[in-house]
Image (cartoon, helix red, strand yellow):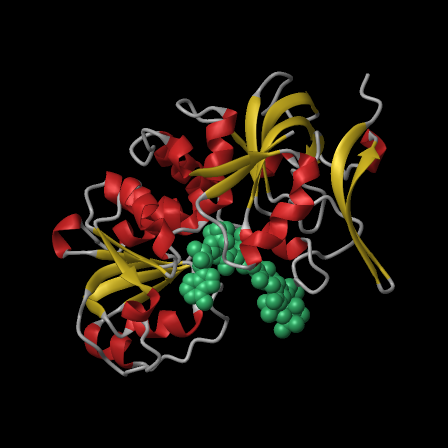
Amino acid sequence: MIQQFDALVVNKQDDQFTVNIQQLSLDDLPQGEVLIRVHYSGVNYKDSLAAIPNGNIVSSYPIVPGIDMAGVVVSSEDSRFKEGDEVIATSYGIGVSQSGGYSQFARVPAEWIVPLPDGLTMKEAMIIGTAGFTAALSVLRLEENNLTPEQGSVLVTGATGGVGSFAVSILSKLGYSVEASTGKESEHGYLKAIGASTIVSREDVYDGKLRALGKQKWSGAVDPVGGEPLASVLSQIKYGGAVAVSGLTAGTSLPATVFPFILRGVNLLGIDSVNCPMDTRLKVWHRLATDFKLEDLEQLVQQEITLKELPDVLPTLLKGEARGRTIVKL
Ligand SMILES: C=CC(=O)SCCNC(=O)CCNC(=O)[C@H](O)C(C)(C)COP(=O)(O)OP(=O)(O)OC[C@H]1O[C@@H](n2cnc3c(N)ncnc32)[C@H](O)[C@@H]1OP(=O)(O)O
Ligand SMILES: NC(=O)C1=CN([C@@H]2O[C@H](COP(=O)(O)OP(=O)(O)OC[C@H]3O[C@@H](n4cnc5c(N)ncnc54)[C@H](O)[C@@H]3O)[C@@H](O)[C@H]2O)C=CC1
């Protein structure tokens, strides 16, 4: 019988904002058909936003953040899952509108759960997490836009981050020549090790001047950075190419012109991991467990931490200090 367990709880009451470890009981968990003993979670940019007062992510407090979890089913009221099943639960309302993965136990609606695919351990699934899933979905969308390695280099912005690192590694594994953009000179070795062919600076991508059209440099791009750099990337994509945009670390406004779209047939592909339909979600996890799977996923792990280290680690992503993935052992 489960009495009490540890969780990270974020609360906002009047002017008080708190982030601390608390002892919860099963009665504190939300409704949902499946009770999961969480083994691993991870740290995504969105988790860091959930742990600050004005992150615009959490819809009601108190909440246990953690948009990702992998664990073992303890009990299920839904016939699709049974005790002992290894599962992944990410996205939807997890860690934003209802309690998430920074807890030893979680209760989740059955329709949000993905069976752990053959070929991945729970730990590997959380090294991947929403960041790796988003990178994989970006690559899938670029493939659907007919991108092939023969068309030339593909750009990855924010390349040392979670989404960026996975985009570099997956594209490299598929035979693409990858130009990885980073502002971190100290991480050039890391980017080469995970598959970058060339490292470019942030200034090579956006030199501070936005042009209607620039030289055609990249056949495609995976962009978790957004903002002005994205406008600059669009102006440098080759005829018919595409940019898969997922993020906003450089800002939310997009001061672009229509010219790349109407003169070069460039496509801007929106990437949403949160409400991605289940059939696509299963397809992406299958590819992450097969042809997208990296030989050494541990290379992308910056650190493995425990719940009590989370309050110090969460803010680091908002300062652009992530390198690959931080995973959390529950
Ligand atoms: C892992 C994923 C990620 O990391 S995504 C990146 C992190 N996400 C964010 O930073 C989003 C934070 N949200 C915001 O900043 C705001 O919600 C906003 C700017 C997107 C919109 O704010 P605004 O105040 O202008 O409008 P509302 O909040 O009232 O919403 C309007 C309308 O949009 C729907 N909506 C809001 N947030 C989302 C969302 N995350 N996904 C999908 N849809 C969203 C909201 O429900 C409203 O629609 P309605 O039909 O009226 O309900
Ligand atoms: N659309 C979706 O479903 C998803 C969106 N995201 C978004 O993708 C982005 C990245 O997420 P994570 O990889 O988890 O974060 P992360 O913190 O691991 O990586 C962010 C990267 O952006 C870089 N960066 C920060 N400021 C920059 C700037 N001004 N110019 C260029 N690069 C800059 C950082 O150095 C780092 O490499 C976030 O905005 C996140 O909200 C992430 C997952 C899913």
In the rendered view, would you say 281 is above or below 252? above
Determine the residue positioned at 25% across, 43% down. 172
In the rendered view, would you say 53 is above or below 187? below
Q: Residue furthest front?
A: 186
Residue 206 position in % (x across, y down): 32, 73
Q: Nearer the viewer, residue 120 or 263?
A: 120
Quadrant position of the N terminus in the picture: top right
Q: Residue furthest right?
A: 14
Q: Nearer the viewer, residue 5 or 73?
A: 5
Determine the residue positioned at 40% across, 74% down. 228
In the rendered view, would you say 104 is above or below 310? above
Q: Nearer the viewer, residue 73 or 163?
A: 163
Q: Quick check: 309 left or right of 268?
A: right
Quadrant position of the C terminus in the picture: top right
Residue 230 position in % (x across, y down): 37, 69
Q: Nearer the viewer, residue 180 or 91?
A: 180
Residue 259 position in % (x across, y down): 27, 81
Q: Is residue 263 visible?
A: yes
Residue 116 position in % (x across, y down): 49, 26
**On the image, which quarter does residue 233 sit in?**
bottom left
In the rendered view, would you say 132 is above or below 214? above
Q: Residue furthest left?
A: 150
Q: Is residue 140 visible?
A: no
Label tally: 0
Q: Quick check: 258 left or right of 70?
A: left
Q: Quick check: 251 left or right of 297?
A: right
